[in-house]
Amino acid sequence: MSEYTHITHTFEPIFDKHSKILILGSLPSVKSREQGFYYGHPRNRFWKVLAAVTEMPLPQTVGEKEAFLIAAHIAVWDVIQQCDIIGSSDASIKNVTPTDIQKILGGCDIGAIFANGSTAARLYDKFQKPITDRDIITLPSTSPANAAWSEQRLTEKWSCIKEYL
């Protein structure tokens, strides 16, 4: 039986003053925490979907991923700063401390906030919306756990971000 681990988000949001949209996940997966960067699981489709939507080359390294986000005017962070979790199971999340997304919202003109999956959206609505008073647009998760969505379907659905870029 797996046990709860207390996790503290250890890497900073990616954004600059030119960022136009904010994409929020819930909390980095075990693989992402090991790499120290967002969407690090090799089967997560996040980077492939964003590259297809923005028509930019697929970034490979952490440095390329950071540069990609800045060039595309996309800010990325997570809803949770600290929590208790079993492995990478979003369903197990409890004892949440939210991130301070005002750090991003106060530093650039974000036209829309998107959730990478329903868990991120639910956690945002519970912990962030009372502070930001801004709605979030829920997109299907790019996680490999969301096997019902093919990469092509994800790309089609995620294409809505283009109107804000």
Image: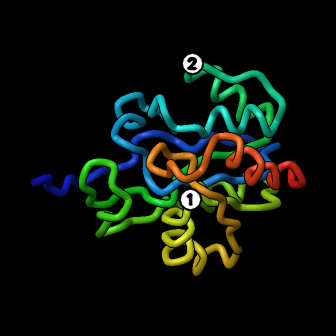
Which percent across, then down, holds residue 115?
62, 60
How are the residues colored?
rainbow
* Residue at figure coordinates x 44%, y 33% from the top left: 41
- Residue 62 placement: quadrant: top right
User: In this orientation, which residue lies closer to the viewer: 157 or 93?
Assistant: 157
- Mark 2 — residue? 61
User: Measuring 9% from the left and 54% from the top, which residue is drawn there?
Assistant: 1
The percent position of residue 126, horizontal first and vertical second, equals 50, 78
The residue identified by callout 1 is: 117
Which residue: 71% across, 38% down? 50
What type is the residue that disc 1 sits on? Gly
Q: Residue 78 appears at what percent x and percent y?
A: 52, 53
Q: CA distance from mark 1 to mark 2?
A: 24 Å
The local crowd at label 2, few if under 14, some if 14 to 19, many if 20 or more residues have their Cα within 10 Å, is: few
Q: SS at mark 1?
A: loop
Left/right placement of residue 73 relative to residue 43 reads: right
Q: Residue furthest right?
A: 163
Closer to the eye: label 1 or 2: 1
